[in-house]
Image (tube, grey):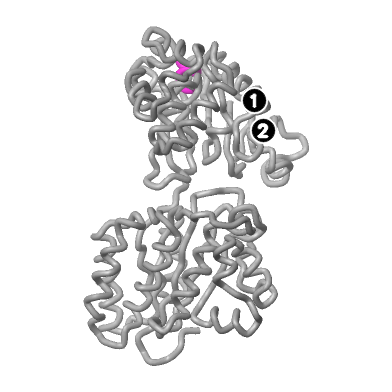
Amino acid sequence: MQETFTDATNRFHATLNIVMQPLESKFLARKMLLENNSRIAVMEGAKNNLPDTDAQKSAECIRELASGLTEKDLLLVLISGGGSALLPAPAPPMTLQEKQDVTRKLAAAGATIQELNTVRRALSLLKGGGLAQCANPAQVVALILSDVIGDPLDLIASGPTVRSDSKPEEVWDILDRYKLSGSLPSSVKEVLRPHYGSQVKEQPEVVKDHVLNVVIGSNTIALECASRKAVELGLRPVILSPGVCGDVRSVSRLYGVLSRFACSPEKEPPPELAAEILQLGPEVGVESWDLCRTMNVLVEEKKEGWGATCLLAGGEPTVHLTGNGRGGRNQELALRVGLELSSDEVKCGAVFLSGGTDGQDGPTEAAGAVVDRKLMEEATSQGLDIDGFLTNNDSFTFFSQLSEGRRLLMPGLTGTNVMDVHVMLLPPSAPRDFQ
């Protein structure tokens, strides 16, 4: 038997039973996965990636299916990002709306994703290993696509097959921290009472022995594959990090300084560049040793003349919204890196690409964009004010108008999601432009 709840609607093939996908992905599973005589039922819900009654009904179907399994059965669970919204199963007597209100207030108060997931798991029948518990004593195999930095199994889709060790008192500590304990509905308090929590969440150790969780796709894997392809193309690959995060302004500055470092005319780049790169590390989620390793490779390339370098990274930076334009973090990052490459500080022919692995960047048709040092000159000649587009978070409109959209990355929906990939091609040290 098989169950899938995924925002990616992956190309998995099996015999039965349920595929859950976002309402916006209508017909995607049928186009990419199902044949006309397929026995797989497609259930849609979670419009705008928010739990809703359609998703709750589908989650109940999955719970009933799992609960009816025996030790002779195998439950195959396919999981990717977005699964949390597709599998809402609030513990009674709490309603879905009451559960959503609690998590919404926590998010508004500044709770971290770890704190949010701790509370979500405690209020759910299926998250935090609840699905695996329902399926016991059947064997459970979960194949997971990770869209979370570091691939923490308990955070991807809130870990329906990963045992949760959270206790009710930990949840109360979080609610107290954000001053929400006193305003909880009586139904939520009932669920979080120790005697009730044990009924919903205590899982026998034997459940662990019946569950196998395997990450079959992640940003790290994507970067390793890209690295092998770079070698085939005659490039020298270096993987910076699969965990790039933080504000796109800091991330774009990092790539700008790295390009200056790599393209410095001296064999030993100025120490102030290395110092700024290391200073930016904590802001963008990249460890110092990863930055030092990358800089060492770039210096060796300059000394030995290896040829063009392909710098690879991935993750999920964030955008501070100041406008209401159309865009996404990949296109905004590319635009900001383009400004860095166009500045007087940078004198090299680096090319930068940022793209979402799902083929869609924000509410746009593009996955990302490609930029180089000619971006500013190109925009100015066409009467486009880059700063204005950035202020309005309107990067998609900018790239659509620039040179008839030729810099946009338009692969179409890929059917998977392992966050974003960043590629920066750095020219060889020889005094010639990189083409």
Identify the residue shown where x is 59% and y is 32%.
Answer: 86
Locate residue 14, reporting x and y percent: 61, 34
| Front residue of this view, candidates 363 and 69 | 363
Q: Is residue 163 visible?
A: no
As helix, strand or loop, the secondary structure at mark 1 comes to: helix
Q: Is residue 346 above or below residue 104?
A: below
User: From the viewer's perspective, is the residue at label 2 or at label 1 nearer?
Assistant: 2
Q: Amino acid at mark 1?
A: Ser
Q: Which residue is mark 1?
A: 58
Boundaries of the magenta span: 131-136
Q: Is 2 colored magenta in this rendering?
A: no
Locate residue 358, reporting x and y percent: 57, 52
State how many labels appear: 2
Identify the residue shown where x is 35% and y is 67%.
Answer: 238
Q: Quadrant of residue 118?
A: top left
Mark number for residue 45?
A: 2
Mark 1 surroundings within 10 Å by alpha-carbon count, few (fewer than 14), some (14 through 19), many (20 or more) = many
- Quadrant of the rendering where the N terminus is positioned: top right
Mark 2 surroundings within 10 Å by alpha-carbon count, few (fewer than 14), some (14 through 19), many (20 or more) = many
Identify the residue shown where x is 45% and y is 14%.
Answer: 189
Locate residue 309, reporting x and y percent: 39, 75
Q: Amino acid at mark 2?
A: Gly
Task: Kindly report the secondary structure that dominates the magenta region of the rendered protein.
Answer: helix
